[in-house]
Amino acid sequence: MDRFILVLVGVILVFALLTWGLGQIFRNNRIYKFVPSSVALLAGIMNIVIARTSTGGFEDLVRGIFAVVLLTGALSGFVTGLVMDKIIPYFRYRKAR
């Protein structure tokens, strides 16, 4: 269980850094920073659907765990993007007053 939590923390860091990096590269177009999280969300949902319809044994378990990892990454990427778009500019504007 400790290793799984470390994997989730690593995935959270990777998606947060990827979202932050894409946000820095594409400052004028904010939608690009949400692309990796959107792809991870779709892949996570796809893995859940396949795991629910499959009749295999361990394959279902692996797909379920992989879906949890992908959905965790997608959530962290979306949260990082929203923090970059809404919370950080609010404090910058407040500081400039």
Image: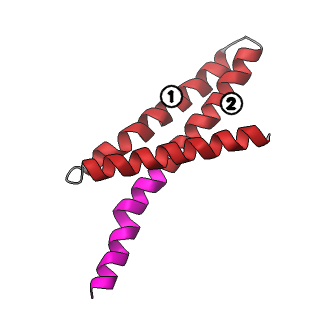
On screen, residue 68 versus residue 40, left or right, reads: right
Compared with 12, 95 (above or below) is below
Tell me: residue 37, above or below residue 16: above
Q: Which mark is residue 18?
A: none
Q: CA distance from mark 2 to mark 1?
A: 12 Å
Q: Which mark is residue 43?
A: 1
Circles 2 and 1: CB distance less than 8 Å?
Answer: no
Q: Mostly what secondary structure, the magenta segment?
A: helix
Q: Is residue 96 magenta?
A: yes
Q: Residues within 10 Å of mark 1 (few under 14, many from 20)?
A: some
Could you tell me which quadrant the C terminus lies in? bottom left
Whole-percent x, y for residue 9 in the image: 63, 46
Residue 19 or residue 71, whichever sits in front? 19
Q: Amino acid at mark 2?
A: Ile
Please report the bounds of the magenta region as a residue range. Answer: 78-97
Location of residue 89 with respect to 61 vertically, above or below: below
Q: Residue at left 61%, top 27%? A: 48
Location of mark 2 (residue): 65
Tell me the quarter of the picture where residue 95 sits.
Answer: bottom left
Residue pictured at 57% horizontal, 41% vertical:
11
Q: Is residue 54 left or right of residue 34?
A: right
SS at mark 1 in the image: helix
Q: Residue at x 69, y 22 (%)?
A: 62
Q: Amino acid at mark 1?
A: Ala
Q: Earlier in the sequence, mark 2 or mark 1?
A: 1
